[in-house]
Amino acid sequence: MSYEHLKDLDMDEVGVDTHQYLLTSQSIAKDTLSTRSRLITTPKLQIASLELVPYDRGNRPLVLLGLLFSLVVGFVFIAFGIVIYVISGSWQVDEKLAEELRNGTPSIVWHPERERNIAIPLSPIAAKALELSLSVLATLCTEATGYVHGTTLKWGLAREGRLAFNANLRLLSGTKGLFSVNGPIFNTIFAITIIFSYAASSSIILDSGFYNFTVISYLPSIILGIVLTIQAALGFVAVHHTPVPTWSSCPLDMTSALIHYEYVRHRPNRCMLSVSKSENPTDDPVFPSLRQPSPMESHKVVGRVVWLIWGMVGMWIIFGGILFPWRYGIIYWHGVAPPAGILWASLLSAVVQSFVTIGLHCCELVTTLARDEMIWRAASSEKGTRRARNPLKTVLGSWQTCGLLVFKPVVHWCFGLSVALSIGYGWELSPFGMWVLAAGMALVAVFITTIARRHPSGPQPAAYGHFQTLADLVDEWSMTMHWGHKKDDRGVEPWPVCHAGTREKGRLPLVKMNCLYA
């Protein structure tokens, strides 16, 4: 029951003193909401006393190390492709080796005709395992550069007053200005390089048609190296041109930094309002709820992401059914995996694979929302929640994020099973591979749907990394925080008005479910 309901009671029943108390309380609330906190550069802060919070600046060297790793991997793939191109041109196929080629039993590494590809004794199973390893490596590099891209984008949006959640669709969001860092052109280039990184990693290994050897092409290796290098370069540009107060991905660290720079402010009397009520203009006391809103109810884009992933499952099933009467959809080429054919096949693979890449990218929004909520809800536990977190620990400490990290290379590998490059035929589309890809996307869809529809239990209001909500719920900032019941206040019997909040040391008492909170 709120104060609006209490005001409807008969004043003869509640008494004149109570009526006067209600009017006084409303006046104090309005005065408090109109008060604006000012920037004070004291090193320690508690919101209650309007001092500013110290925030963790994150591990910037670790972020730069991730960019450097991606840059080195890019150079290695470029060098590997060049080496294949150079040394394969000096080899000749003699009669003995030609006979082994026809029999499918080459005794040494060789290059098919004069297309500057090399073949190595490797079974199809080992080749697919190597292809999965390349997909995992591409995922590691894109995640390292993507972390930089996402963090710099958040601070760019914050300066424009358009940052609401810690989780964002970074490839589909951008800062103002066509040529600005993290602007439309910057993000488009980043998206294209991510798509080509997965497409090229699945095109390096070609299907030879024999059991005892496989073929490696130099051109996709060079393409993969170039796009990884471009991603790392864009990351360094973003780091140089974007002031980033904190590199921490923890939503509490981000919130404290945003409060420090006055991008958000603490609003009193909202200690029991979740993110779904963050836009509610009233701050009347409310009763705690044992069931919190789900990510789908808290973020309007989550529902669209769920429908998108399930739509992709149906798309791959239908596509496989269309191809099934012909068994294979083939775009032929002349020669043995010519460079021009490899280039066109890589472009076609990138176009088709872009659906998978964008879909999995959208899934990051759901898993990040769940991860941020898990960090916040740890404040109700005995140990509390910590603000200063290593980026790797933040990612690896969430089963939702780890699950998506596992799904990404596996689903892209499934795509490699549906779209294959054959040295003798060309670009092949397999209906059975399409159905395997559909099965992989179905697992992702079930995983994401489960997370999106899950309702956290307990009276602690859900925030899902929403910065204004976290700023309202936290009233005392520290590196380790506990949340719970803090104090009672005088109210209208039998509904005393209480307050819930945070403190540094010691677990707080449980919230009183039969009391109003403000």
Image (cartoon, helix red, strand yellow):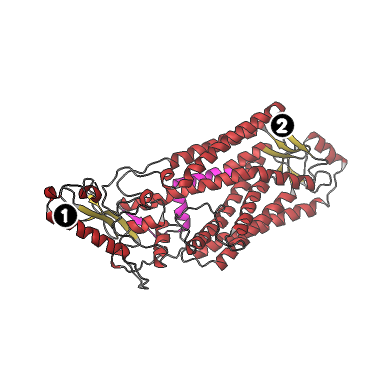
Label drawn at residue 308: none
Q: From the image, which quarter does the C terminus lie in?
A: bottom left
Camera-side residue of 229 and 293? 293
Q: Position of residue 474 (x, y in %)?
A: 33, 58
Work out which residue is located at the far bottom of the displayed protein and give it: 41
Residue 489 appears in view: no
Q: Position of residue 38 (x, y in %)?
A: 36, 70
Left or right? Give the position of 155 relative to 73: left
In the depicted structure, whether residue 325 falls above or below residue 94: above
The residue under the point 60% across, 32% down is 317
The residue mark sitting in front, 1 or 2, is 1
Main secondary structure along the magenta-highlighted residues: helix
Q: Is residue 511 magenta?
A: no
The amino acid marked with disc number 1 is: His
In the depicted structure, whether residue 424 falls above or below residue 4: above
The amino acid marked with disc number 2 is: Tyr
Work out which residue is located at the far top of the displayed protein and give it: 325
Q: Position of residue 114 (x, y in %)?
A: 84, 47
Q: For numbered disc 1, what is the local secondary structure?
A: helix
Residue corresponding to mark 2: 328
Mark 1 vs 2: CB contact within 8 A: no
The residue under the point 77% across, 35% down is 104
First to last magenta residue range = 383-409
Residue 83 appears in view: yes
Camera-side residue of 507 and 184? 184
Left or right? Give the position of 134 relative to 271: right
Label drawn at residue 19: 1
Q: CA distance from mark 1 to mark 2?
A: 80 Å
The residue under the point 55% across, 63% down is 64
Q: For numbered disc 2, what is the local secondary structure?
A: loop
Q: Earlier in the sequence, mark 1 or mark 2?
A: 1
Q: Position of residue 88 (x, y in %)?
A: 80, 50
